[in-house]
Amino acid sequence: MTMNAARQATVRLEDVFPIHEATGRTTGGAHARMKLEDQLYTRRIARAGKLVLAT
């Protein structure tokens, strides 16, 4: 396999999964709300800026 073919075979996560910037959408608040189809999810944003997924 040539170097060019190996480079083309590499799949980046950015190409498979979309990236959504959440910082601007939370407007500096302590919670993030997300909608997936007909379900609404609320997640807390920790002081360290991490999204807390556990309820």
Image (cartoon, rainbow, N blue to C red):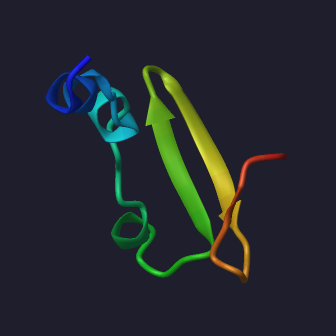
Q: Residue at x 39, y 36 (%)?
A: 13
Quarter-wise, where is residue 32 in the image?
Answer: bottom right
18 on left or right of 23: left
Quarter-wise, where is residue 5 in the image?
Answer: top left
* Image coords of residue 1 (percent x, y): 26, 17
39 on left or right of 55: left
51 on left or right of 52: left
Q: Residue at x 32, y 40 (%)?
A: 14
Residue 9 or residue 33, whichever sits in front: 9
Q: Residue at x 49, y 44 (%)?
A: 34
Residue 11 or residue 15, whichever sits in front: 11
Identity of the residue furthest to the left in this view: 4
Identity of the residue furthest to the top in this view: 1
Identity of the residue furthest to the right in this view: 55
- Count of numbered circles in the view: 0
* Image coords of residue 38 (percent x, y): 47, 21
* Image coords of residue 2 (percent x, y): 20, 24
Compared with 38, 55 (above or below) is below
Compared with 2, 25 (above or below) is below
Compared with 54, 51 (above or below) is below
